[in-house]
Image: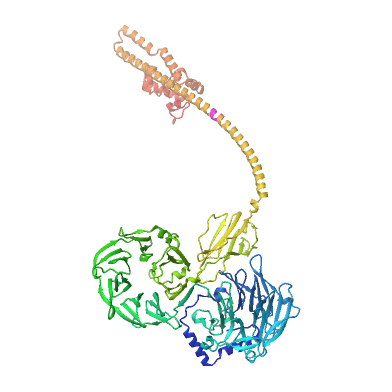
Amino acid sequence: MLRSSNPKRDTGIRQRVGAYGCEPFSFILICFLATFTLTCQELPPVQNYTPIDYNAQNQNWGIGQSEEKNIYVANNTGLLEYNGAVWRLYQSPNGSTIRSVKAIGNTIYTGCYMEFGFWEKQAEGDLAYQSISSSLELPLLEDEEIWNILELDNWVLFQSLERIYIYNASDKSVEVVESKSTKAHMFNFEGTLFFHSVDKGLFKIESGKPVLVNDDALIRGTVVTGIFSMDDRPLLVTEKGNFYFFDSGILEKWTSPFEDNIPSLNIYSSLQLEDGTVVLGTISNGIFQIDKEGNILLNINQKKGLNNNTVLSLFEDVDHNLWLALDNGVSVVNLNSPFNEYIDKNGKLGVVYASMLYQDYLYLGTNQGLFSKHIENHEDFNIIQGTEGQVWVLKVEGDALFCGHNNGTYLIENQEAKLVSNFPGTWDIKPIPGKENLMLQGNFNGLSVLEETGEGWKLRNTIEGFDISSRFFEFITEGQVAVNREFKGVYKLNFDEGYRKVIKVVNEASKGTGASLVKFSDNLLYTCDQGVFKYHNLEDQFKLDTLLTNMFYVDNNDVPVGIFVSDIENSQLWYFTNSNIVQVRPGRFSTTAEVNKIAIPSDLRKNLGVLGFESLTPLKNEKYLIGISNGYLTLNLNKVASKEYVVRINSIARKSTTSALENVVLVEGSADFNSSQNNLSFSYSIPEYDKYTEVRYQYQLQGKYDSWSDWTKDPSVSFENLPFGNYTFKVRAKAGNEVSSNVASYTFRIKRPWYLSNLAIALYVCGATLLAIFVHKLYKGYYQKQQEQLLKESKKRLKRKRLKAQKKIVQLKNERLQEEVKNKNRELAISTMSIIKKNEFLNAIKDQLKQNVKNPGISSVIRTIDRNINNSDDWKFFEDAFNNADKDFLKKVKGVHPELTSNDLRLCAYLRLNLSSKEIAPLLNISVRSVEVKRYRLRKKMNLSHESGLTDYIMEI
């Protein structure tokens, strides 16, 4: 739906669109029939961008392209910028809908409600707006909107429904031309500016004033939407789809096949492409492209892939892509792409397994049957009755078309299928060398032979002796066939002369997975994931072909995936990788094969149907048909061309811990960032808008990473917490297989943090020096103290050693003294015991002598014995021994008890030796009773209490 921010203009717009939508039923029917007849057309790739993709409103009014190849779109919300990777929205200067856009160089002119001006890139990579209308001497009219912008030499013309403002880009002056019209269309035809005014006619501008060119009723009663050069004659296109030549102001209707096929259209926009063809943008049926003869080349509408049927503006970019500003979204048609598409959106066809161009009919073998259509018209594919089910192969042998099917083999004649072999599951069909009327079939359960007889082709026999599925087979020599059964290896079969049974089977073990068997340049090749193996006749085995293996498997990221497809007629070999379709041809000037890679996006490889059942069929004029899971593609090698790409850094954003993300100036040379601004994001792109060209990027940050990153689709990268230092960011791009001609770079420096600045480092050095001196002094004092302490400790240790030695000496002396005391005590005890024994002996003799006391001689002996018992010498000897053993005891006792007599001291000495009264009695030459009496008296003298023991007391003194 068309919208306007101007209420007055809304009425006119609704009237025009209402007129477009309220044609009689007959017109709707005609348009429907015309659309229906074109539903089968192969179309160039279409890419759609929805409001969700570009994050703005649905409606778009105009498209332009800058010198940097960025795309700019006038949108209801504002100005959209697309660099091939990222959409960006710039809000309208006054919040209104931007109705028109024109890119001249890198300056973007826009017009909207009550405002027009231009946008220019700032140093940060952002667009900034500058108003032209605000400086007008003559103010804008009330509710005026700028609907169209045109460039003419050094002037830029802004058109509203009432005026044309002519802006001189050199001196910034503006002239105003009154040009009232109901629909703003201006045309630059061969340097002359034309505009149309309803009810007045066609005008041109000369010397800044409108000049009437033609006021024919045919012109006054309609709206002119385009003026083009056709056969060097000016051709007018009206909104109703009528075409008129006008030479010297005279109208002449152009009758074309276009008008015959589609007699009435509602044309809103039009554009003549660089190749001379004309594209018409309609209100309700998308676009039509017509050639110079008026033939319809293509029709693309919403049903065929556009976002919307209402085309408000058309634009051809420098790469010949056709951009459509739609009522709902933006679409781009890759008119110059080597690929065309037939997309089966209804699921009628299914997955395409085989295809063939035969007698001007295109045949598609799918999992749902065999379909065909004539190549000269755009009718839909029709299924050939009886072929419902899985088709595996289509082969033309001689004048016959064979269809390998789950049911067996069909012969296709006059769009009808005849079952000529009911042996189920025909994988492939090949003529038998030397047998013109025989063909060998590979089937689910072995091999079989077709024979041509007078009644036509029919199954002659199945071959005995071999019942293994034979999808891949090739003739080695006459009568010998190689059959590849992936996991079981290659079987080399020898047949009897009549091809009725196998007479010899040799099995060569499998060499890998994903195996296929093909012929290329008269060589039999066995391919698998381990490489390419060539059959050698003399050795009768397959050997690794290092030349082909290195050629096909040199890049580990781009190795063959699936089977190899042989095009024997054109001496070509094809295979698919994840990012390429690869064509291999014999070398023209050497024996080395030539490899031609056609880049494809990785998503397409996943859409090629079942892995291992890839289908590629030559059509004609270097055109090939590739089966996919929902239709097919055609590849035109004549359109495959190398292209130069330039990668640009679009913006650099920095972020610190205290600030939000902000763009920085894209300066030449080196940029400096504070240490806190060490989080940087880089965005970059190449302006490539082809659907089948996948763009990938590779970057390097010198100063941190020495190697390049892996290739990635992400058009931006961020680096966080970069340390201080010098860096150079580099990025390059790869579009398909073409690496960008340049490496975009940006050199910058992360400054040292303040605490690592030169001044700080100098202060740190000074501080460190002072600290070192201070620490040195501290350590010196510390070590002096330690030394003094060590000396003190040493002295203490020596003193302790001396004391210990002295103590040891004292201990030894004490031990010696104790030993002496022990010896003295031993001597004292011995002397005491000897005296006791002696006295006891003498007393015993004395007691015996007393029995003869009357004998005088005995009395003298008794006296002698008594003298010996009471001998003072014995006491003297005992006293000396006792004093040696217990020095000063007697002195101590005498000191404490001075009243003690010598006999008391003697008794104390005996008690000190812990002698009993019985032992003491012989020493004193008294009875035991007398000893007890002496003990009692001694207690008295010592004033001992009754509880205190005499012996204990004496022992404690």
Q: Is residue 313 visible from the viewing direction of this image? A: no
Question: Residue 869, position in %: x, y?
Answer: 37, 13
Is residue 333 placed above or below 769 in the rendered structure? below
Q: Is residue 82 visible from the viewing direction of this image? A: yes
Residue that sits furthest to the right in the current view: 137
Quarter the N terminus occupies? bottom right
Question: Residue 23, position in %: x, y?
Answer: 55, 91
In the displayed structure, does residue 640 sit left or right of residue 491?
right
Q: Is residue 796 magenta?
A: yes
Residue 88 occupies which quadrant of the picture? bottom right
In the displayed structure, does residue 676 sit left or right of residue 908?
right
Q: Is residue 786 magenta?
A: no
In the displayed structure, does residue 81 sit left or right of residue 543?
right
Q: Which residues are magenta?
A: 795-799
Is residue 531 placed above or below 352 in the rendered structure? above
Residue 497 occupies which quadrant of the picture? bottom left
Is residue 220 placed above or below 429 in the rendered structure? below
Question: Residue 780, position in %: x, y?
Answer: 62, 36
User: Residue sitting at 40 percent across and 83 percent down?
Assistant: 382
Is residue 952 placed above or below 280 in the rendered structure? above
In the displayed structure, does residue 943 sit left or right of residue 58?
left
State the predominant SS element of the stretch in magenta: helix
